[in-house]
Image (tube, grey):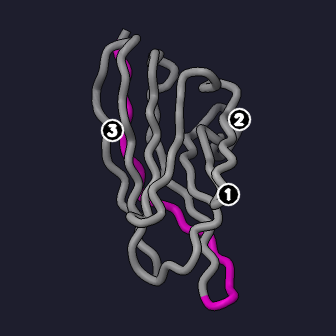
Amino acid sequence: QVRLVESGGALVQAGGSLRLSCVASGSIGIITAIGWFRPAPGKQRELVANITSGGLATYGDSVKGRCTISRADAESAAYLRMNSLKPEDTALYYCNVDIEFNSERNNYWGQGTQVTVSS
């Protein structure tokens, strides 16, 4: 089993910055992809940012140019730097990982970390 622990969510003013962290533990083989999602109108969850084991980063349209995702494989962790935060960024941010372990691939979700941006 894999456990994801997110942290870094907070109440910030518009224009501020945050750094979210996601650390995976448990039966981890290879983290093929790790990233964050958040709820969005009309969707179950939308991509915020995702990074593959090869370092390829993908960003959601609503955060492009304002976020940077990085990963630290030695720590089984990923970090999301969010700048120029807007009130519409307010959401529960969920960490998501794709893991390959013993030739099996599975996907896991964290419990979320709350980001609240005040205007």
- How many numbered markers are drawn? 3
**Relative image position of residue 92 (x, y in whole percent):** 44, 41
Which residue lies under the disc numbered 1?
A: 54
10 Å crowding of disc 3: few (<14), some (14-19), many (20+):
some
| Image-quadrant location for residue 114 | top left
Q: Sequence order check: which comes first, mark 3 or mark 2?
A: 3
Amino acid type at mark 2: Gly
Q: Secondary structure at mark 2?
A: loop
Name, please, the residue furthest toward the bottom.
Answer: 102
- What's the distance in space between the residues labelled 1 and 2, CA to CA? 31 Å
Quarter of the image for residue 23 reads bottom left
| Quadrant of image for the C terminus | top left
Q: Residue at x 69, y 88 (%)?
A: 103
Main SS, magenta residues: strand
Instruction: State the image coordinates of residue 32 (x, y, percent, origin top left).
Output: 64, 66
6 versus 39 height, above or below:
below
Q: Earlier in the sequence, mark 1 or mark 2?
A: 2
